[in-house]
Image (tube, coloured by chain):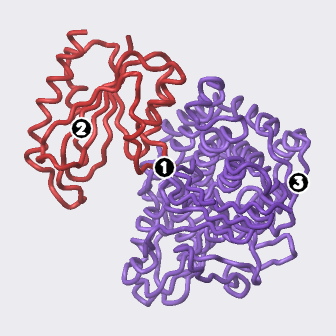
Chain colours: A red, B purple
C-alpha cells in the first residue's frame, strides 16, 4: 500500500511545523519505501495531483483553536468525510474537498490521518515557539510507530 | 402576466473567498429588484501601500489574491518600470509571459473543471461529478498543478509568489528545472488539446446578449502583459488614459466599487480577450478554436468556458516555446533608478484587465495607490446579465430553477470575490 505524508506549512514561525515534522520523518531510516513525502504551502489541492493509485494519506498542519500551544490534535477521516469542516479556502476547495475528490476518484486507501499542532506565533519575524518544537518528536514517533505496525 | 411574487435571498455565498449575496425580487412577472451584494469588508490594500517603498509593492499586492497574485505583481512592476523608464530586456519579458501563462493555466483549469463544469453536466459539486467524469476531473487537477509549477519556477512558490522584483526576478531558474518542467508540459499537451473540443461540447445555455467587450490589444501578439485598452465599441486608449472613460463608483449594496465605461457596464476576462484578439492567436490555436464551430466574437457569455480553454491551449504553447528557448542570464533583473511621478500599469489577469496607478515620490515611496480589479469591472455586467438572462429564462419558472440559473450565470464570470462556488442557505419570502 502506498502512503503519502503531506506537510502543510510555510517558513513563518510556528506555521512551519508541518514541514519540520515531514523533514524529521524523511530523515528516518526505519520507514518502509512505500512511504513518500510532500511539503505544501497554501494550496490544499496540490497533493491530489501527486496521487495516481490508491494511497493512504497522513496530513500534518498547524492548527489554531483554544487549546494550549503545542497541543496535538488527532483526526481520522474515514469514508464519511465531514463537510462541515470546510471553511475559508480559495474557491471553497480546501483539504476536505480535496479528500472528497480523491474519494470520488477512488484514490483513498483506508482512513486518512490528520495531525494538527496548536500554534501561537505566525509572523515571519517571530521565532518558532518552544512548545511547538516539543511536539516534533512526539508526532514523528507516533507516525513512525503507526507505519511500522502496518 | 403572473401575479406571483418571488423574493429570492441568498444571504451568504458560502464556501467562497469573498463574501457576497444575491437579492432578487420578482413582481407581476418582472424583475423589480436585483442586486449582487458584495459585503466583504473593505480590504484597504490601496491604503496599506501608502508610505511603502516601491520595492515592497510586488510582495504586498501579491497578497490581494491567492488565485491571481501574478497579475497583481505584473501590473505593479510594469507601472513602476514605465515611470522609471526602465526596460528589463527580452529575457525578463519572456519570463514574465511564462509566469503569467502559469497563472492563466492554473486559474482557468480550476474554473473549467471544478467550478463551472458541474453546472453544465448536472452535478451539484466537483466531487459528485468526479464519480462519473474521473478522467476530466483528473485532467483539471493535473493542469492546475502544472500551472502552479510554472508560477513556482519563477516565483519560488505558487501561492503569493515572492520571486518578482521591479526590474525582473530575484532568481533565474536552472536549466535542469526548466528541462523538467518542459517535459511535464509536453506530456500534458494531449490533455490540453482534448480540453477545447470538450468545453465546446458541453450543454451551454444559448443566451445571446448585447454587451461591450474590453481587453488589452497588442500590436502583434495575444495580450498578456502589454497593450492598449480596446473595446468592441471602438475605444482605443493608452493605459494612462483609463480614468478618462472608466469611472468607479460606490453602490450602497456593495463594498466592491462598480466600474463603468462611459456610464455603461462592460465585460472583461477571457471571452472579452478572445472577442477582441482572436486575430492575434497563432494559427495552431486558431484552427482548433474554429473547429469548435463557435464563432468569435461571441455574444453568448456562456462561451467564456470555451474562451478559457482556448487560452489554456495558447498558454501551453507559449510556455513550451519560451522554455525550449530558455537560457540562464547573467542577472535576472536590471537596476532601477527612481524618480517622482505617476506610474500606470495594466495587464490581463485571468479574469480581465487589472489596472494600477501609483503616485511615487522622489525616493520611491508610494504616496497614493489605486487598483481596479477585474471583478469590480464585471460587477455591473453581471447584474445586467442576470436581469436579461433570467427574464429570457422565464420568470414563471420554479424558484429553485431561477436560483440555479442565477448562480450558474454568476459562476460563469468566475468572479474573484465570490470565487464562483456554490451558493447555499437560500431563504425565500413569499
Q: Residues within 10 Å of mark 2 (few under 14, many from 20)?
A: many
Residue A51 x %, y %: 47, 24
Count of marks placed on residues: 3
Residue B279 visible in the current orientation: no
The chain identifier of the residue carrying mark 1 reads B
Please determine whether, in this image, residue A3 is positioned above or below residue B326: above
Q: Secondary structure at mark 3?
A: loop
Please determine whether, in this image, residue B136 is positioned above or below residue B245: above
Check disc 1 and report the residue beneath it. B15
Residue B95 x %, y %: 58, 54
Residue A27 x %, y %: 21, 25
Residue B164 visible in the current orientation: yes
Q: Residue at x 80, y 58 (%)?
A: B389
In space, the residues marked 1 and 3 are separated at their CA atoms by 33 Å
Q: Earlier in the sequence, mark 1 or mark 3?
A: 1
Check disc 2 and report the residue beneath it. A116
Q: Secondary structure at mark 2?
A: strand
Q: Residues within 10 Å of mark 1 (few under 14, many from 20)?
A: many
Residue A37 x %, y %: 34, 27
Q: Secondary structure at mark 1?
A: loop
Of the two numbered discs 1 and 3 in the rendering, the one whose residue sits closer to the viewer: 1
Q: Residue at x 85, y 69 (%)?
A: B232
Q: Residue at x 44, y 71 (%)?
A: B41
Check disc 3 and report the residue beneath it. B296
Give the quadrant of the C terminus of chain A.
top left
Give the quadrant of the N terminus of chain A.
top left
State if disc 2 and disc 1 touch (CB < 8 Å): no
Of residues A27 and B3, the one nearer the viewer is: B3
Amino acid at each position: 500500500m502506498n502512503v503519502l505524508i503531506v506537510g502543510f506549512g510555510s517558513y513563518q514561525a510556528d506555521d512551519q511545523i508541518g514541514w519540520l515534522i515531514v523533514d524529521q520523518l524523511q530523515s528516518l531510516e526505519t520507514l518502509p519505501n512505500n512511504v513518500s513525502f510532500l511539503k505544501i504551502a497554501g494550496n490544499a489541492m496540490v497533493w491530489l495531483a501527486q496521487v495516481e493509485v490508491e494511497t493512504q494519506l497522513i496530513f500534518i498542519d498547524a492548527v489554531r483553536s483554544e487549546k494550549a500551544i503545542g497541543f496535538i490534535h488527532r483526526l481520522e477521516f474515514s469514508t464519511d468525510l465531514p463537510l462541515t469542516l470546510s471553511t475559508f479556502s480559495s474557491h471553497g476547495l480546501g483539504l476536505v474537498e480535496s479528500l472528497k475528490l480523491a474519494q470520488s476518484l477512488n484514490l483513498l486507501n483506508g482512513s486518512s490521518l490528520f495531525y494538527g499542532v496548536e500554534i501561537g506565533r505566525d509572523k515571519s519575524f517571530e521565532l518558532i515557539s518552544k512548545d511547538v518544537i516539543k511536539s516534533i518528536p512526539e508526532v514523528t514517533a507516533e507516525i513512525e510507530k503507526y507505519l511500522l505496525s502496518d | 402576466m403572473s401575479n406571483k411574487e418571488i423574493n429570492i435571498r441568498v444571504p451568504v455565498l458560502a464556501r467562497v473567498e469573498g463574501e457576497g449575496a444575491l437579492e432578487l425580487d420578482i413582481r407581476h412577472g418582472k424583475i423589480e429588484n436585483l442586486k449582487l451584494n458584495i459585503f466583504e469588508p473593505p480590504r484597504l490594500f490601496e491604503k496599506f501601500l501608502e508610505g511603502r517603498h516601491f520595492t515592497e509593492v510586488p510582495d504586498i499586492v501579491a497578497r490581494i489574491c491567492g488565485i491571481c497574485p501574478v497579475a497583481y505583481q505584473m501590473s505593479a512592476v510594469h507601472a513602476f518600470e514605465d515611470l522609471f523608464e526602465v526596460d528589463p530586456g527580452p529575457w525578463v519579458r519572456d519570463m514574465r509571459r511564462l509566469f503569467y501563462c502559469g497563472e492563466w493555466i492554473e486559474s482557468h483549469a480550476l474554473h473549467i473543471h471544478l467550478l463551472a463544469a458541474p453546472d453544465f453536466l448536472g452535478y451539484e459539486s466537483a466531487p459528485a461529478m468526479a464519480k462519473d467524469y474521473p478522467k476530466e476531473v483528473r485532467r483539471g487537477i493535473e493542469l492546475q498543478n502544472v500551472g502552479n509549477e510554472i508560477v513556482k519556477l519563477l516565483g519560488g512558490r505558487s501561492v503569493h509568489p515572492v520571486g518578482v522584483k521591479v526590474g525582473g526576478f530575484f532568481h533565474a531558474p536552472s536549466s535542469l528545472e526548466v528541462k523538467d518542467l518542459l517535459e511535464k508540459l509536453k506530456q500534458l499537451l494531449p490533455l490540453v488539446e482534448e480540453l477545447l473540443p470538450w468545453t465546446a461540447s458541453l450543454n451551454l445555455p444559448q443566451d445571446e446578449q448585447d454587451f461591450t467587450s474590453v481587453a488589452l490589444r497588442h500590436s502583434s501578439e495575444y495580450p498578456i502583459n502589454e497593450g492598449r485598452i480596446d473595446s468592441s465599441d471602438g475605444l482605443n486608449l493608452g493605459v494612462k488614459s483609463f480614468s478618462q472613460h472608466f469611472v468607479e463608483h460606490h453602490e450602497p449594496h456593495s463594498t466592491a466599487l462598480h466600474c463603468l465605461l462611459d456610464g455603461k457596464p462592460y465585460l472583461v476576462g477571457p471571452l472579452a480577450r478572445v472577442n477582441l484578439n482572436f486575430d492575434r492567436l497563432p494559427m495552431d490555436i486558431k484552427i482548433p478554436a474554429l473547429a469548435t464551430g463557435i464563432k468569435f466574437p461571441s455574444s453568448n457569455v456562456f462561451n467564456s468556458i470555451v474562451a478559457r480553454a482556448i487560452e489554456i491551449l495558447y498558454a501551453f504553447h507559449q510556455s513550451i516555446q519560451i522554455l525550449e528557448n530558455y537560457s540562464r542570464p547573467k542577472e535576472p533583473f536590471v537596476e532601477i533608478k527612481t524618480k517622482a511621478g505617476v506610474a500606470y500599469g495594466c495587464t490581463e489577469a485571468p479574469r480581465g484587465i487589472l489596472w494600477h496607478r501609483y503616485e511615487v515620490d522622489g525616493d520611491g515611496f508610494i504616496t497614493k495607490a489605486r487598483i481596479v480589479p477585474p471583478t469590480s469591472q464585471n460587477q455591473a455586467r453581471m447584474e445586467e446579465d442576470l436581469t436579461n438572462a433570467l427574464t429570457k429564462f422565464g420568470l414563471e419558472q420554479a424558484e429553485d430553477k431561477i436560483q440555479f440559473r442565477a448562480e450558474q450565470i454568476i459562476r460563469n464570470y468566475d468572479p474573484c470575490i465570490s470565487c464562483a462556488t456554490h451558493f447555499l442557505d437560500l431563504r425565500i419570502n413569499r
